[in-house]
Image: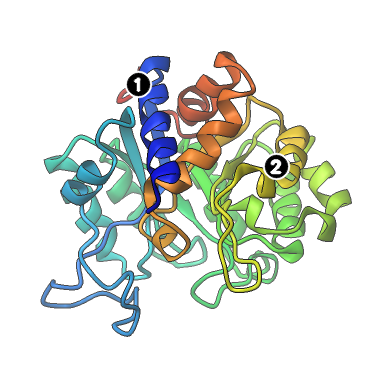
Amino acid sequence: MDRRKFLTIAGTAAAARAAGIPIVDTHIHLFDPGRPQGVPWPPKDNAVLYRPALPARYRALTEGLGIAGAIEVECSPWIEDNQWVLDLAAKDKIIVGTVGNLDPADPEFARQLARFHRNPRFRGIRYGNLWGRDLRSDMGKPGFVDGLKLLAQSGLALDMANPDPALIRAAIAVTDRIPGLRVVMDHLPQMDPSLARADLRELAARPQVYVKISQVLRRLDGRVPEDLAFYRDRLDEVCGLFGEDRVLYGSDWPNSDQWAPYRTVFRVVHEYFMAQGPVAAEKYFHRNSIAAYKLDVFVG
């Protein structure tokens, strides 16, 4: 790392501390390839990711940034990995919540949801473009919509991963059918908004929909730009659509390591939101996560 980048990242950490904002990172993944059963993801041939991603490592790499808590988002389709994460959270209080993996169409969904929701750190489930799923099509499965209604009645959220135009349309369909369900669209800046502007405007008109300003960095001609200027237009469009009350900070660590180190990822969004003023920055880094995931019991 050259001296200019080092000083910029160091300055970002100092600014975060000075601002006094207790930051909640709403999107990290936890896994341990060293377990006897291994892991379904990441694959062994991914040299960047295939190593333990556990709370102690996360604490160390975010030291000094003002991280008050993190929400784990499940990266495994194995049901018992929901419990594995909850057991980790019981040992390290930096994990203030988890978004698990359950299938609303599964006949066992109600029982599974009740089991995991007994732990107050279980804050929702994810469903979207992962594990071969198709949300719009899957809404036609017997019991699927009833499962999502039960999720809403339980006060839990639905994360939607890896957006594309089809997933945006599916999110509109879900919120039409279940208006009381809080929806969190993950990684929206990774999608070019011009591919679905009309649908994004319609989705943004629904106050129960939040978006994660996560997976902001992307590749261009084989490199990853690290300057905010490259990302500003897309951030302006997404934040302009959803407003300062419905955007959340998420690092996507350690998946983000495939683009840049954590502190570089953090610096880009920190620079952007601090420029919006202290109120907007506090909402993005802290307050909106409480509203989206009902974290009052863990984060004040």
Mark 1 residue crowding within 10 angstroms, few (<14) / some (14–19) / many (20+) = some
In the picture of the structure, the residue carrying the numbered disc 1 is 17
Name the N-terminal-most of marks 2 and 1.
1
Rendering coords of residue 245 (x, y %)? 63, 25
Q: Which quadrant, please, contains the N terminus? A: bottom left
Picture layout, residue 260 above or below residue 71: below
Residue 99 appears left or right of 86: right
Q: Where residue 106 sits: x, y (%)?
A: 45, 67
Looking at the picture, how far across and down is residue 161, in whole percent?
A: 56, 59
Where, by quadrant of the figure, is residue 135 drawn? bottom right
Q: Is residue 183 visible?
A: no
- 10 Å crowding of disc 2: few (<14), some (14-19), many (20+): some
Q: Amino acid at mark 2?
A: Arg
The quarter of the rendered structure image containing the C terminus is top left
Q: Residue at x 73, y 56 (%)?
A: 168
User: As rendered, which of 83 and 189 lies closer to the eye?
Assistant: 189
Q: Secondary structure at mark 2?
A: helix
Query: On the image, numbered disc 2 is attached to which residue?
Result: 232
Residue 208 appears in the rendering: yes
Seen at 69% across and 59% down, the residue is 191
Q: Residue furthest front?
A: 3
